[in-house]
Image (cartoon, helix red, strand yellow):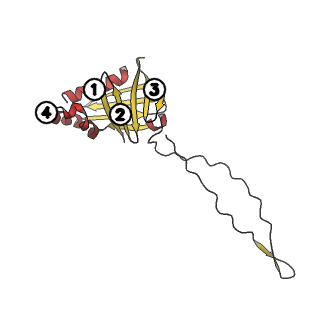
Amino acid sequence: MRHFASLAALFCAALLVAGVVGCVSETDAPVAPAAEKPTAAGTVEPTAPKPEVSKPAVPPVPKAPTSGGAAGLIGNWTIDLEAMKQGAGYQNSTPEQRQQMMAMFGMMDVKFEFTNTEIRAKMGMMGQVQESTSRYTVSNVDGKKLTLESTDAKGAVGTIEAVLDGDKLQFNDPKSGSFTLKRI
């Protein structure tokens, strides 16, 4: 996918120099026993229970999405440096290359915002900011694996596979490699 590939290419270049929405259910309060009322003869007789009045439905309270297909993508993300350090590109690098990679990432400010329909990417490095927006849909969900179809601002269409595991989102692209984001 061109949009994802260009973002991954930015990461790779730096590497080379280096909803669910949860429901909160509200339970009804316990019903108090029927009240008693005194009679004229001084005895007590129970009153009839009041008919229950139905409560209006309480809408679910949204929680921060952490999984669950497309809804789990919604939110703000950034590069997961710890996950990157576990990758083959980093592991197969010399200590000098690793130091360069970390220095490059130290100068970068990369953020992604996933909405229901858009991915907004913002990358700042050395005083320059690059922003892009693409539209996306999740075309397939298989457990934690998602297939995203995206169209960037120039109309380029592509597909990329991702794995959503809680607050980690790993993109896998055979052409440009893989990278992992973490929720912020």
SS type, badge 2: strand
| Label 3 Cα neighbours within 10 Å, binned few <14 / some 14-19 / many ≥20 | many
SS type, badge 3: strand
Identity of the residue drawn at 20% across and 36% down: 102
Asked whether the residues under the numbered discs 4 and 1 touch, taking CB atoms below 8 Å apart as contact, a structural biologist would say no
Marks 3/1: CA–CA distance: 20 Å
Marks 4/3: CA–CA distance: 37 Å
Say which amino acid is labelled 2: Gln
**Which image quadrant: the C terminus?**
top left
Q: Which residue is mark 2?
A: 170
Pick the residue in front: 38 or 123. 38
Q: Which residue is mark 1?
A: 10
Q: Vertically, is 148 above or below 69?
A: above
Mark 3 or mark 1, which has the lower sequence index? 1
The location of residue 114, given as percent across then percent down, is 43, 33
Say which amino acid is labelled 4: Thr
Mark 3 or mark 2, which has the lower sequence index? 3
Q: Which residue is mark 3?
A: 136
Marks 1/2: CA–CA distance: 16 Å
Q: Which mark is residue 68?
A: none
Asked whether the residues under the numbered discs 1 and 2 touch, taking CB atoms below 8 Å apart as contact, a structural biologist would say no
